[in-house]
Image (spheres, coloured by chain):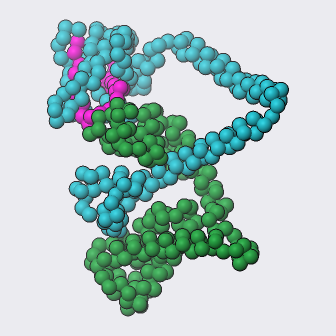
Chain colours: A cyan, B green
Amino acid sequence: MEHPRIDDNKIIDHYLVGQLSPDDEAAFEEHLFECTDCLEKVQWGEELRRGLRTVATEDTARATVALGWMAWLRQLGSARRAGLASLALLVTLLPAVVLWQQVELAQLRSRAAGSSALTEPIGDLAVLSMGVVRDAEPVEVRVDPEKAAVLLSLELPRVDADRYRVTLVDVDGSVQWRGDDLEPSLYDTLMVILPSTYLVPGSYRITIEAMSSAGASSAGELEFRVVSSM
Amino acid sequence: MTLDTAAAVDLVQRISDGDTSADAELVERCGKVLRFLARRCTRNEADAEDLYQETLIVALEKIRRHEVREPERLAGFLRALVKNLSVQRYRRRSYDVEKPSDALPDAPDERQPNALGHLLHRERSLLTRRLLTELKVSRDREVLSRFYIAEESSPRICQDLDIEPEHFYRVLHRARQRYRLLWEEHAEPG
């Protein structure tokens, strides 16, 4: 079995879930003897599948045990059942109340820290992290003019393309910067590094387009306002 | 070190001639694949290791007895061997289970994984749960579980999760990559 066929027909994915014909399975397994790359891929895929299966099996077993408990409970009298239910409710709610208080506290702390936490420069390079949120108010970002460059980390709402185009437009509609063929990171973000002089105080809009053989299609827009941190 | 046609012919010849260094070379060239295939044919690590060892022993015996008629197809021979031995082991077990209990008074049930097997199973479970929780993209969890566990068809998953069908394998690939990155962070020592 040759590599173009393996890649084009997603042979590894189909092999892992047992969807290959017996002939294809045999040919692919024989190929493994001479291809360390494919062997490494299926070993990893098998490990992933086994891990997921282990968890799924355990969850199923727990559900079965839970059903057994339900059967046992049904045999009890109504007074005993009510007592057990109250106890279970108490035990269940106590951690929830404690957790709720902790979440409240964390939210209060977050609000106190200010909403610009992710728009503050970090370290020597100014790092600005922004997400595409529909109908969101423009965010305000601080750019230190002393910094040589600004790293924009643009979080994509979803990744359905291999390549993207990012266009930075100022308030007058003039294109300040455009980047084609940008590849999303493993965490579904596009990384753009710009000289800090490109982001003088003012309003900006970033448009993101997904590139495919059919052309460009909108993948999101975001607006932001730059203020100097000096 | 892999096994191409030339290496296969050479190995079969040397093993047949009694060259013991060729035995070690067979393990080096084919051991990883045989172990992988053995693991895929069995339910736990202990059974896989037994099947792997048995395959190597039988393979060497057959090669020495000149029973490999197409040395250039050694990979196919080894693959078929591990599958056949796996089926034989399964049949032997089924037969043992059907025997009256007094025929095997104190025989341990080999189908149960040993203590090491339990430990590995537990570790895998804990690690998988942790990684699934840490996956930042919730769609990753769903795609991985539905494809690898529920074994749902890709069109069905695409329809439910609003994924363009032509992008499905890319989405699956990225989910697997992100999972692997987390796995390497947690599973690698240090």
Residue name at image x 54 percent, y 16 percent = A110
Q: Tell whether position A90 is magenta.
A: no
* Closer to us: B144 or B161: B161
Locate the C terminus of chain A by quadrant: top left
Image height check: is B59 above or below B132?
below
Q: Is residue A46 visible?
A: yes
Q: Which of A133 and B70 is in front in this view?
A: B70
Q: Residue at x 64, y 44 (%)?
A: A64
Give the magenta range: A144-170
Drawn side of residue B35 relative to residue B163, left or right = right
- The image shows residue A211 at horizontal and vertical percentages of 21, 31
Q: Which residue is drawn at 28% across and 8% down?
A: A202
- Quarter of the image where the N terminus of chain A is located: bottom left
- Specify whether residue A154 is painted magenta: yes
**Would you identify the image quadrant in which residue A18 lies?**
bottom left
**Towards the viewer: A218 or A56:** A56
Q: Is residue B106 left or right of residue B24?
A: right
